[in-house]
Image: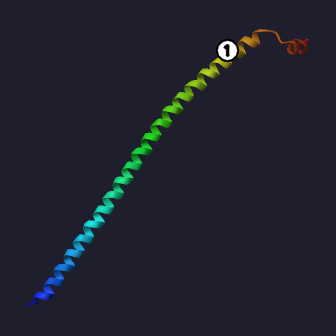
């Protein structure tokens, strides 16, 4: 049989290991929460960037349409340099 002192030491080792395991679990849970939070922020930033990209694409399309219209208006009018070179 084990002596009472030996049993107490074993109990202390088991309790210490248990506490250490709990502390490790707490650290891992906190890190996991930090990663989840960082991923959520990244996803939100990605969504905002995609929205901004879509708005910029619309603006570019509108500007290209205006440019095409302006080119059409300019090309309908004779330009002095072009008229001379055509002769």
In the image, 25 versus 69, the foreground residue is 25
- 72 left or right of 22? right
In the image, 3 versus 58, the foreground residue is 3
In the image, 51 versus 26, the foreground residue is 26
Number of callouts in the render?
1
Q: Quadrant of the N terminus?
A: bottom left
- Residue depicted at 42% across the width and 44% down the height: 41
Check disc 1 and report the residue beneath it. Answer: 69
In the image, 53 versus 86, the foreground residue is 53
- 84 left or right of 40? right
Q: Quadrant of the C terminus?
A: top right
Mark 1 lies on a secondary structure that is: helix
Quadrant of the rendered structure where residue 83 is? Answer: top right
- 68 left or right of 45? right
Percent across and percent down for residue 56 are: 56, 29
Quadrant of the rendered structure where residue 82 is? Answer: top right
- Residue depicted at 39% across the width and 45% down the height: 40
Percent across and percent down for residue 81 are: 88, 15
- 3 left or right of 27? left
Q: Residues within 10 Å of mark 1 (few under 14, many from 20)?
A: few
Percent across and percent down for residue 49 are: 50, 37
- Residue depicted at 28% across the width and 66% down the height: 23
Q: Is residue 63 above or below residue 19?
A: above
Q: Is residue 5 above or below residue 81?
A: below
In this view, the residue farthest toward the left is 1
């Amino acid at each position: 049989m084990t002596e009472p002192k030996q049993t107490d030491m074993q109990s202390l080792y088991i309790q210490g290991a248990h506490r250490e395991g709990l502390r490790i679990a707490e650290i891992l849970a906190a890190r996991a929460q930090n990663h989840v939070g960082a991923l959520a922020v990244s996803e939100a930033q990605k969504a905002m960037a995609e929205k901004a990209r879509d708005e910029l694409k619309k603006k570019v399309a509108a500007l290209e349409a205006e440019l095409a219209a302006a080119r059409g208006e300019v090309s309908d009018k004779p330009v002095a340099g072009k008229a001379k070179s055509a002769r």
